[in-house]
Structure formats: structure tokens, C-alpha cells
Image (spheres, helix red, strand yellow):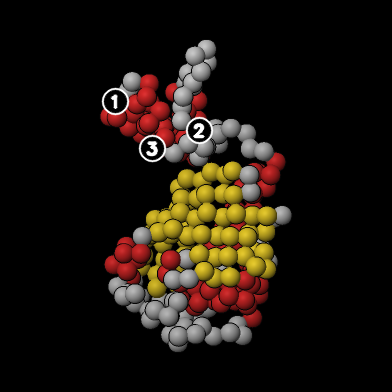
Amino acid sequence: MFKKKKDEQPESIESLANKVTYGKLSRRGFITALSAMGATAAAAATILTVVSEKSKIAASTGTNRPLTQNEQKTVNAYQNHLSFRQNAPTPQPSHTPQPPTGNPEVERHIQMVINDYHPEAILEDPLSGKQIIGHEAIAAHKRTEAFGLRNITIEPTNTFVNGEQIISEWVATGAHVGTFLGFPATNRAFNIKGVTVVTRKDGKIVKESLFYNLDDVRQQLGINF
């Protein structure tokens, strides 16, 4: 890795930094490359910190490289999906293990959300403990979310896209007011940092994976699992 031919010009630090910015090179790979050039690990880590900050600034100010048409579609789809979810109806909390069905407003909203997923889409949420596959299972997950959580906001802090896949870092806030995924209400507020990776094919979500610290969730909500 990073070997060059005798007459080949070494790859510039700026080029390597851009690869890190757009997810084409890992942080470890970046440090390894700079170390091979003669930089100390401390120097490489310092440069990496600056690269990370520039990446965040670029993402927030729109100064990243121009997106391809497909990438822009992916970004638009993600933003629309997120906006729609955050405008969900707020039914009365459910305190039973299974959230009620038959609420027309909730069911209508869930159906519109589900239409954004492929019929065999996979949803991964650490709290569920297993993959949630297909429209029916994802709808049940969204239903327990609607009746168990309140005042949900999901604020993206850093988002980048590669083809039909989008990776978004976020901060989620809200309150646990009803039974959620089998956990009785604790009426505690939460403020959780995490990452979502969404993969689309032909405009539909085929896989959505959430990553966050389960111990942090358990401590904030006061639940055991």
C-alpha cells in the first residue's frame, strides 16, 4: 500500500486529505501514509484533525465537490425522508406492549413513510436486537416509535454521500413517554448522538442501519436490556 514506482510522483497530502474527506481513505490509512513520508504519528494526527474540521465546514457551507446527479437525488431523498418523519403526528402514548392500530392519522403517515422503502428493505436498530425486514415489520417499528416517543428531532451534524449511499451523523432528542420496543415509558428525555447509513437502489431504501451507544441510551432512559 502506498508504494510508488521509481519515476512516479508521490501522492500529495492534499490528495490524501481529500480521500479522507470523501470517505475513500480511512483515518488509519491517512496516518500510515504520512508516516511513510516521514511524519511523526503526532504530526499526522494533527493534520488529520484539521482535515476533519475542514470536512465539517465544507459540509455545512456547501463547499464540497459538486455532487453527481444521482448523488444529488440521494441527498434530496434523504432530506425529504427526514423532514417527513419529523412532521409525524403525535398520538396519545401507548402503555401496552403492542402499540394500538387503527389510528387513521398515524397509519396514513406510516404508509407514506413505508412507501420510501423497498418491499424487502432491511432496517437495523440496536434497540431492536435483530434485523427488521420488509414493509410490515418496518411499519410495526415505526408504529411503536410513534406511540412511544414524543417531540423527536433529528439534527444532522455531518452528512456525506457516495453514489446511492448516504452517511449522516446526527443528534436525536425527544422523550420516552410510552412503551417503545417493549420498554415501558420512563418519561425521561434523551439526547443521543449516532450515525445512520442509508443505501438506496432505484430510488428506494434497501437498507438503513443505525449506530449509537446502547449504554448511553440505557443510562439516559433508565431502561435495562
Q: Residue at x 29, y 25 (%)?
A: 40
Q: Mark 3 is on which residue type?
A: Arg
Q: Is residue 150 above or below residue 6?
A: below
Residue at image point 40% right, 73% down: 176
Q: Is residue 190 above or below residue 13?
A: below
Residue 100 pos. (x, y %): 54, 85
Badge 2 crowding class, 10 Å Cα cut-off, few under 14, some 14 to 19, many 20 or more, is some
Q: Nearer the viewer, residue 34 or 77?
A: 34
Mark 3 and mark 2 in contact? Answer it, CB < 8 Å.
no
Q: Which secondary structure lies at badge 1?
A: loop
SS class, disc 3: helix
Q: Is residue 159 visible?
A: yes
Residue at mark 2: 19
Pick the quarter of the image with the C terminus. Answer: bottom left
Identify the secondary structure beneath mark 2: helix
Name above or below for residue 26 compared with residue 164: above
Spot occupied by residue 194 in the image (x, y as percentages of width and height) = 42, 56
Q: Position of residue 86 (x, y in %)?
A: 54, 63
Mark 3 Cα within 10 Å, few/some/many (few <14, many 20+)? few
- Mark 3 or 2, nearer chain start: 2
Figure check: 76 above or below 123: above
Q: CA separation, marks 3 and 2?
A: 12 Å
Mark 2: which amino acid?
Lys
Mark 3 and mark 1 in contact? Answer it, CB < 8 Å. no
Query: What residue would you read off at disc 3?
Result: 28
Q: CA distance from mark 3 to mark 1?
A: 13 Å
Query: Dot 1 corresponds to which residue?
Result: 40
Report whether 77 appears left or right of 180. Answer: right
Give whichever of discs 1 and 2 has the lower sequence position.
2
Task: Measure how far apart labels 1 and 2 are at the Cα level.
Answer: 20 Å
